[in-house]
Image: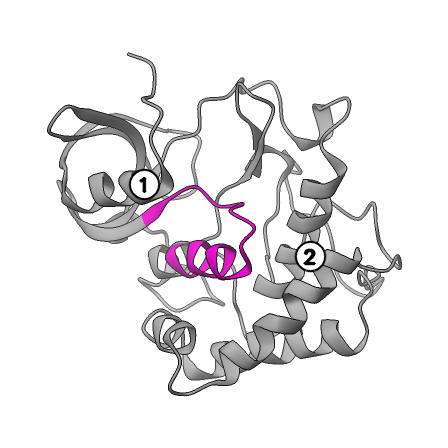
Amino acid sequence: MPQQAVTVERALAVLAAGTVTVGRQILWSSNATFLAEVADGATRLHAVYKPRSGEAPLWDFPAGTLCLREMAAFTLSEALGWRLVPPTVLRDGPYGFGALQAFIAHDPDEHYLSLPAPDPETVRRIAAFDVLVNNADRKSGHVLSDPQGRLWAIDHGVCFHADWKLRTVIWDFAGQPLPPAVADHVRRLVPRIRDDGGRLRAALAELLDPAEVQALCDRAAALTDHPFYPLADPSRRAVPWPPV
């Protein structure tokens, strides 16, 4: 059945409280990832379920944290007001605790590098977002176009490391200034992350290591002081493999 059209707030409520029925596994994912249906009353949503128990160990990210980073990415996207990341919750599911994210209907043959004319405003926001979250794996297939042509950013399990790890296929704007609206949103984000008593800082502190929260704040402050997209570092791999 097609995905029901609901508000973000309703989607979050359904994802958090609905009954989860797991469907097929997405076999090409690096970690255990399942398509699922979540039902709450008359509302049924397709979702992507990533249980913590299915996360593959990584040498540079602490075990069992990828689902938390998915949630942190959604939290930050909402705090910026950009709504790039589909509605996401953390909860118990059929295979244990993990991230549950609204599924974005899309043509799998359409992704960032194959799109003839992706919305430039959204792409610039995604590029800035990846700098903020320190995305180590922005593949082309992690940018989806829904049936209305709206772009979404998915797969943020390897983000927010305290060390610089940006790897992305979106280097189109390297060295260019941030759009004024993007720069303003980033500028207004900095004090909210710094505020120890604030809701955003508290939410991030539940998901990330203190050093990672501080590094996020430092990246936002650096973008505020120098509002330009970074250049690729020639001394390190700057594009993920495979790129799609």
User: How far apart are the two marked residues, 2 and 1, measured between alpha carbons?
Assistant: 28 Å
- Per the image, the residue denoted by label 2 is 128
Which quarter of the image is occupied by the C terminus?
top right
| Secondary structure type for disc 1 | loop
Residue for point 36% across, 25% down: 5
31 with respect to 134 (left or right): left
**Picture coordinates of residue 89, whole percent (x, y):** 29, 50
**Picture coordinates of residue 129, whole percent (x, y):** 62, 56
61 over 10 or under it: above or below: below
Residue for point 59% across, 50% down: 137
Q: Is residue 58 magenta?
A: no
154 with respect to 137 (left or right): left
243 with respect to 27 (left or right): right
Please report the bounds of the magenta region as a residue range: 71-88
Q: Quadrant of residue 19?
A: top left
Q: Is residue 78 magenta?
A: yes
Q: Viewer-nearest of labels 2 and 1?
A: 2
- Tell which circle, 2 or 1, labels the residue nearer the N-terminal end: 1
69 over 86 or under it: above or below: below
146 with respect to 33 (left or right): right
Q: Quadrant of residue 200?
A: bottom left
Label 2 neighbour load within 10 Å: few <14, some 14-19, many 20+: many
- The three-letter code of the residue at mark 2 reads Ala
Residue for point 38% across, 31% down: 103
- The three-letter code of the residue at mark 1 reads Ala
- Per the image, the residue denoted by label 1 is 32
Viewer-closest of 79 and 100: 79
